[in-house]
Image (cartoon, rainbow, N blue to C red):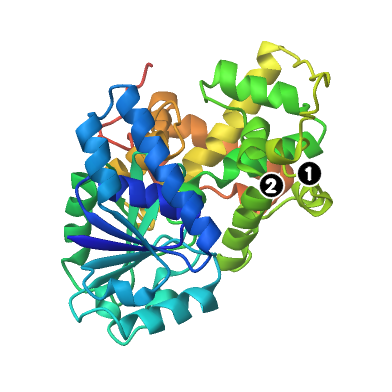
Amino acid sequence: MTIGIIGSGAMGAGIAQVVATAGHAVRLLDQNAAALEKATAGIAASLRKLAEKGKLTTEAAGAAIARLHPTASMADFADCELVLEAIVEDLAVKQQVFRQLENIVNSECILATNTSSLSVTSIAAACRRPERFVGIHFFNPAPLMQLVEVIPAVQTRPGLTDDIKALVASWGKRPVLTQDTPGFIVNRVARPFYGEAIRILEEGIADIATIDWALTELGGFRMGPFALMDFIGHDVNYRVTESVFTAFFYDPRYRPSFTQKRLFEAGYYGRKAGRGFYDYAPGAAQPTPNRDAALGQRILYRVLAMLINEAAEALYLRVASAPDLELAMTTGVNYPKGLLAWADELGPAQVLATLDDLYHDYHDDRYRASVLLRRLARENRYFLTHEPVPAIR
C-alpha cells in the first residue's frame, strides 16, 4: 500500500515514520519547502538513532528512509491507496484540502483525518464520496505512542473501520474504535483530570504542588495535572478544553477555567515558554507540597470520581466499548489503571457517594452522576464483570 501524508509537522512526520517503518511507500506532502526538508531529515535521523540503539536493523532503517518520498505536489498522491491529513485544526482548511484531493486520487483511495477535536463527519461532508472517509487519530509522538483512535463518520461505509483497525494494528499500534463525539475517547474522558484539579486550586483547598503530589504519589499517575498541562502547553490544552466545551453545547462538565485562560492569554504556555503553573527559569524555586495524607486522599478521590464518572458516561452512551475505554486511558494518557477497573476496585457505590456529596454542596451540573454509575451502585454490581459487589469488602 502506498500512503500519502498531508502535513510535515511533528504529527505528520511522526505518522510518516510509523508507516514507512511498517513497509509502506510514503508520500509526505508539504508546500513549505523548509518544513518538508526539516521533517525528512528528522525522520531519517530518528530511524538511524533507532538502528544505533538496536531497535531496528541498519538495513530496516535504510529501507524505511528509502520508502519516504517528500513532495510539494498533491498530484503525487494519484497512486495512493490511503491519504491521511495532519494539518491545522481548522474545519474549512481541512475540507478544502479533501475537495482538492478527490480530484487527484482514484475512486478506491481511503481518505482519513488525524483531527483530535473536529467532527470527522463535518470533514467528510466536503467529499463527493464520504463513505470512504474515516478518522485515524494518532497521539504525539506518533512513533512512541501506541494508541490510535479509529473514528467512523456518519457516512463511513460498513466494514471500513474494521479494515482500518487491522491496518493500524499491522503498524504495531493498538487501535480503539470510538464514536464521532467531541474529544473521542481520550480528550473527552481526561478533561476532569485538568478541570477538577484547577477547580480545587481555585477554591484554595490546595496549591499546585500539593495537588500534583496527591495524584502522583497517592494515585500513581505519572504526572500531576499541573505539571502535565505545562508539559502539553496551555496553547494546546486550553484550546482542547474550550473546543470540547463548545462542541458539547456548553455542558458544565467540560467548562474551561479562567485560571488557565489567563495563562494562555499571557503567553505562559508552560515548559515551552519557561513559565506556566510552574516557573521553569533556571534556578527558580519550586513549591513544596503539603504531604498531609488526609488532604491528599480527599484531592485524589475527588478527581478520580470525576474521571470515573466521565468514563461511565462514555460507556453508557456507547462512545466506546469497555475494553476500548480501558485501553485508551492506559495507553493514550498512561493512567495507572483503567478507570472502570478503578471504579470496581473502589466500588461504584463509593464513587457515586463522592459525586453526590459534591453535587449536594455545589448544586453544579458538572457533578451530576452518570445514569450507569447510579444504576450499578443501586444494583451493587461491578462495571467490568457485572457481578454483584460482595457485602463485606
SS for dot 2: helix
Q: Look at the image and tell me whether residue 374 can be seen.
A: no
Q: Amino acid at mark 1?
A: Tyr
Q: Quadrant of the C terminus?
A: top left
Residue 128 percent location from the top left of the image = 31, 87
Q: Residues within 10 Å of mark 2 (few under 14, many from 20)?
A: many
Q: Quadrant of the N terminus?
A: bottom left
Pick whichever of labels 2 and 1 is earlier in the sequence: 2
Q: Nearer the viewer, residue 102 or 336?
A: 102
Q: Nearer the viewer, residue 243 or 302?
A: 243
Residue beneath disc 1:
268
Q: Nearer the viewer, residue 7 or 141?
A: 7
Give residue 200's mark.
none
Residue 197 quadrant: top right
SS for dot 1: loop
- The residue at the point 18 percent across, 70 percent down is 158
Q: Nearer the viewer, residue 41 or 112?
A: 41
Q: Residues within 10 Å of mark 1 (few under 14, many from 20)?
A: many
Please, is residue 11 above or below residue 160 in the view? above
Residue 362 percent location from the top left of the image = 73, 46
- The residue at the point 57 percent across, 27 percent down is 223
Residue 353 percent location from the top left of the image = 55, 34
Q: Amino acid at mark 2?
A: His
